[in-house]
Amino acid sequence: MDIEMKVIDNRTLKLSQFLSREIPLSRSIYFATAFINLSGLRGIEESVKAQLISGGEIELIFGLDFRLSDPGVIAWLIQMSKSYEALSFYAFSDPRWGGEPGFHPNLYVMERPDGMTSIVVGSSSLTRGGLEDNIEFDLALEVPASDPFAKEIKEAYRSYRAKINLFVPDEEYLKDYDRAFSRLRDSEGRALADPDTAQMIRSLLGRGDVLSHELATEKQLIINAMNSLRVAKGEYVHLRNITSWMEREARRLNLEFEWGSMTSIIKGRLDEHLVGRGGEELFERKKGKREGEFYRLSKKGEEYRKGW
């Protein structure tokens, strides 16, 4: 196994410097981090924007802590994802309130066009302290993407991506999160004992559950659409037909969707879970510039409807 290794401690080399150098060299980027804040993201913002402008893909999974992951970074991600379809982000609620295990990996994976993968794993979260100010210990590795170790790291990331309680924060969630964050920050955490604050956070957790369910529902509806529309197993189905079928079914089931952007939502979910994209690899897209709107179920997609 041919691996180059380097220690990053924010003293001789800052993680923000390392990421800012590696991100522009990469085509696909996957970050999973325990906490995130806007001041941390600012340290790599220019390289992130340059990567998105050049057509690269970035996916980010982060944990939400009502005192550490700030509302500003969620607002930034929501706005950026509207401008760049290749940016995806997902969150977990504060585990102290939801009864789930804490989400605390710090893993940065950057796949380059030359077949190499740059990996950072260690103590640094995507915060100003983690990227620049704190004394941290991170191990940076460069390894061929075909190496079993790189594949094992990618599978670890995919396992986070497949968690059932994952959700995408929206403007409604952000508004309530901002209020909870401000109350807890201003009281130095004492507001956790306040019944009104506790109810506010329970409402947030409920909204997170709804958003998590919507993600799962969209995937299942797409799979159901393909199964219904195709003539034979392995056949490709056009995006517009998937959209029409899903809209009819969603209205029949009284599901809430942003109907005006239905096609974009479906295409985003399809592309997010394409084979090789780092998601659940449920779908395949027909190759060729003119064929890009045709999709079919992958092997995992075929198994998904059987309870995979």
Image (tube, rainbow, N blue to C red):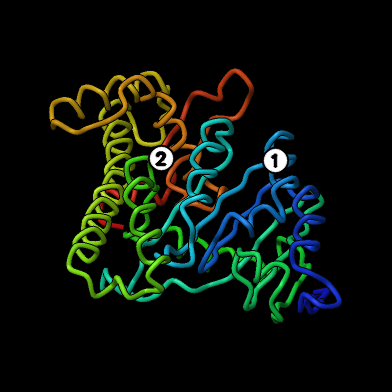
Q: Residue at x 39, y 31 (%)?
A: 266
Task: Name above or below for residue 55 compared with residue 165.
Answer: above
Tell which residue pokes out farthest to the right in this image: 12
| Residue where numbered disc 1 is placed | 49
Compare residues 243 and 95 and report the one nearer the observer: 95
Q: Residue at x 14, y 31 (%)?
A: 254
- Decide which of tag 2 and tag 1 comes sooner along the chain: 1
**Nearer mark to the viewer, of 2 and 1:** 1
Task: State left or right for residue 170 relative to residue 210.
Answer: right
Task: Name above or below for residue 279 compared with residue 259.
Answer: below
Q: Position of residue 64 (x, y in %)?
A: 42, 63
SS for callout 2: strand
Tell me the tag on residue 154: none
Q: Position of residue 169 (x, y in %)?
A: 39, 47
Q: Position of residue 32 (x, y in %)?
A: 55, 63
Q: Residue at x 31, y 58 (%)?
A: 308
